[in-house]
Image (cartoon, rainbow, N blue to C red):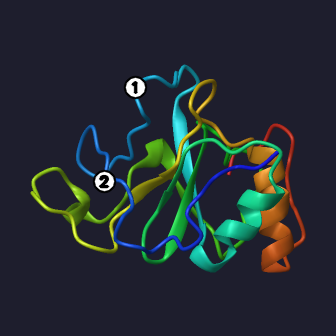
Amino acid sequence: MHRPHIPDPRPPRLAPVLCDRPGRLTIPEQLPTSLGYDAVGTPWEHGERIMDRLPRVGCVFADDLRWWWIVPAGSHIGVTWPPSTSYAIGAHMADPSWTRTRPKPGPGHPRLLHAPESGSPYTPPIPLYFLTCRLAGSTPHWSLGAAS
């Protein structure tokens, strides 16, 4: 199945930053987020490779450094994401310059890169986890019943 996407995550034509409160990535309204959501940031140079290998891709945002994959809330519990990834609980980005108070967000701010037309906004976290581990050269590590 072919998933249309922009080949380079850094072109200026990406969709505008979507935030419902300061620093939070916002999912398009037509996609339900009943499970809550977090974001997993991967190095931008791996973005296309990951997208091409996933069985399903939910909402993906991109900035100058990372592709941010929307996953169900709590996808960090019991797993150790590779050091090359970033995990944003509640999809809250740390940089306060990514807030709505800025009228024209510049390059470097997360922008919607891909969204499914319907269904779920989530990228399945387990395949994403194994792909990020493989690309980072890390051994997957998880613990049942343990929170990390």
The dot on residue 29 is 1
Residue 52 as seen in the image, left or right of residue 84: right
Please state which amino acid type lies under the numbered disc 1: Glu
How far across and down, in percent of the image, does residue 70 sit?
A: 57, 45
How many residues crowd around disc 2 within 10 Å: few (fewer than 14), some, or many (20 or more)?
A: many
Please report the residue visible at 85 percent of the width from the left and 80 percent of the height from the top: 137
Q: Which residue is mark 2?
A: 17
Q: Is residue 73 above or below residue 63?
A: above
Residue 38 as seen in the image, left or right of residue 104: right
Within the image, what quadrant is residue 117 found in? top right
How many residues crowd around disc 1 within 10 Å: few (fewer than 14), some, or many (20 or more)?
A: few
Q: Nearer the viewer, residue 132 or 47?
A: 47
Distance of label 1 from label 2 (alpha carbons): 14 Å
Within the image, what quadrant is residue 146 found in? top right
How far across and down, in percent of the image, does residue 20 sit?
A: 27, 37
- For the image, the number of numbered tags is 2
Figure quadrant of the N terminus: top right
Please state which amino acid type lies under the numbered disc 2: Val
Name the secondary structure under disc 2: loop
How far across and down, in percent of the image, does residue 45 sit?
A: 63, 79
The dot on residue 41 is none
Q: Nearer the viewer, residue 32 or 77?
A: 32
